[in-house]
Amino acid sequence: MTIKNEAQVLTISDIPELTAVNAGAFREQVTSALRESPTVIEVELSRTRFLDSSGLGALFALYRSVGESGEATLRLVNPRPEVRQLLELTQMQQLFEIVQR
Amino acid sequence: MLRHAVAPDCAAARDAAAAVRRFYAEQGASSAELFGCELCVAEACNNAVLHAAGAGRARPVSVEAVCSATQLELRVSDHTPGFDWPGKVALPGVRSANGRGLFIIQAYMDEVLYFRGPGENVLIMRKRRETGRAISPGPAPVLTPDQSRHRLNECERAVASLTHELRVRSETLSAVFHCCAELGRAGASVGFEERLLAEMLHLTAADWYVLRLVTPDRRRLVIAAVSSAELNPGPLALAAEGEGAGSLEVRVALSRVSARFDARACEPAEALRAAGTTANGVVYPLYFSDVLVGTVAVGRRAGDFAFGDLPEEVGRIFADFLAIQTAGLRSREEDLRTQLLARELDLAHVVQRSLLPVALPQMRGFGLAGGWHSAREIGGDFYDAIALSEYVSLLIVADVMGKGVPAALFAMNLRGLLRGLSALFEDPAQLLGRLNRLLFEELSAVSMFITAQVAVVDVRAGTVTAAGAGHGPLLYVAADGVSIGALAVQGLPLGIRADVEYRSQTIVLGRPGTLLLHTDGLTDMRNPAGETFGQSRLVAWLAANHGRGRSATELRGRLSAELKRYRGDAPMADDQAFLLLTEETRHATSRFQKIGRPRKATVAARAGAANH
């Protein structure tokens, strides 16, 4: 997983999968990156082949940290079709912008 | 069909989901089907891991995937307390942190069934296959000759592999059936593990094994069978922090999950390194009905132990069979021990009852009756009476301190000696001294001893001469004919010291005379409230019952009834034995009538009377 912060845009990418195995680590790493107060947070999902409900829980925690208060805009970028279908099925698009570039 | 045992953690659950994906990919499932199935297995396994309770936390989760032309079916077992699957699972609110797992399973699958069972629940998930998809992915392309040869080679390898699998499965079953048949024959249980494990070595191409069984106290794993003597590194403690906690066999036993062993990459203290510094293999847990039976380790001393799916399954079948048979044998041994114990108790009862005299000697003008009540566990209480002349008898009650057949046998020995010696000694103290010398060696060798009370009654002279060996006092009607005396002549029990001088004491029996010798089973008996009967109650009973013209037999019946009444529902902790001698002449009755009733019971304290 790669986290980069440029011009207050925090980009989290290279996530092969987000599951019960690594959701905790994902949350810890992202939480420490949030100290730099980004205004946009993009989770790049083009390489994410698999996501389960614990992974959805980690995205939801991110929303609770910064999205709910409106501190930052949250985007899920380029999810694969199966992942996008899961995000839509669980109505995560109500919390995140889902962007295809 | 794919079958996968998942260690109870999320990483293993993830691996299982990926294995299901690979399996269905080989069957030509679409990417949407693959994603859905992988996701649902991950959700089901995570739930099984995260919600497992108690011993279920250590048990593996099993995942099965089945593929047909029209349907994909997944079965996931869990050891959680289980729950009622809701008819329709609603999506939790978008702001809800969790609870999406069941919703996802329901959304991706066409049919979901959840069965709750004792100790294990099963989730069955079914997904209809997309139209037009069959087991093979699409029409076969036109192949070049090289491709055809390659395909042919692959098919031949597959057929060879299937043939091998069939042979191994058939030999496994044959070995198991053969062993079952052998176990049916008497005596064949000895060494059955070795025979079964030798078959296992052959079928898995292994060259060593170590079978450990758990001890009855469940604290250690001890060696039950090894392929060669140097593989016996001693027992392993099962306590998690104790000695042996680091050893692979203990970890496998406690986690219930089989594990690979490689001597080149394990702790120097690992017990299985006894198989050699280059040894490797697999350790299986042996469980039966959720109870640890032991572990079995198999492997090769050198060279990699090629443990593919099939040998692993063969090993698992053998391990399961070993666990079942070992548990069965143990249970049969247990039954046998219980039967032997019951038989010993029966035997002891027979011996003990045979010790009691069929008929007691009756002296002129006096009646003599004995009472004996046996506790459930056999003790060694008994009484006897030997006529020394028309007017003189020797009475004894004794208590062999011990249980079961040994106590009954010592009582028998004592009775024999007593009958042989009684004519030689008029003084009970001398008789006890001689009995002690004769019995000391045998009694002290087994840490047993005997308490006894011996009395020589001369009804013509109206005297009782008594001696005691660690026994309670005898009760008698004192010279005033009213009060009850307690005569305790102290002395060491038989079997404590080699040479003991006993002393005797003579008292005058009041009239009408009554004498009661008894074991401590009477006075120590407790009622349901836990209160002992005690000597004062026995004295009061005797004071209220003697001299009313009742025969010895009648008094015995009354005393037995009183003891039974007092005990009520309380368990009988010890045997009870007593001898009652009472004057039965008309003369005695008329004397009693002159004295009159009611009378107050008093204990005539005697020098040396014990505090009973």
Image (cartoon, rainbow, N blue to C red):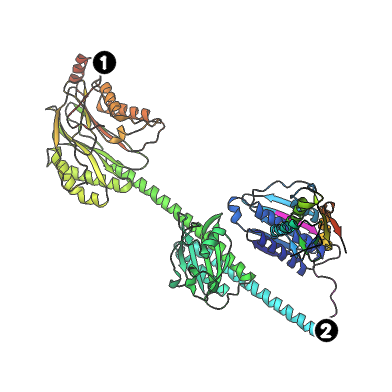
Q: Amino acid at mark 1?
A: Pro
* Side of B206 relative to B580 (left or right): right
Q: Is residue B134 left or right of residue B305?
A: right
Pointer 2 residue: B144
* Magenta span includes B269: no
The image quadrant of residue A53 is: bottom right
Which of the two residues, B538 or B308, is positioned nearer the viewer here? B308
Measuring from the top left, give residue B597's x and y in whole percent: 25, 15
Chain under callout 2: B
Residue that badge 1 annotates: B598
Q: Residues within 10 Å of mark 1 (few under 14, many from 20)?
A: few
Q: Using the rendered view, name the quadrant where residue B531 is placed.
A: top left
Q: Residue B69 versus residue B486: which sits nearer the camera? A: B486
Q: Are marks 1 and 2 in contact (CB under 8 Å)?
A: no
Between the residue at mark 1 and the residue at mark 2, the CA separation in whole angstroms equals 125 Å
- Membership of B136 in magenta stretch: yes
Q: Amino acid type of disc 2?
A: Thr
B546 up-or-down from B278: above or below:
above
Magenta span: chief secondary structure: loop
Which residues, given as a range, are shown in magenta?
Answer: B123-143
Q: Which x, y percent locates residue B546?
A: 25, 23
Secondary structure beneath label 1: loop
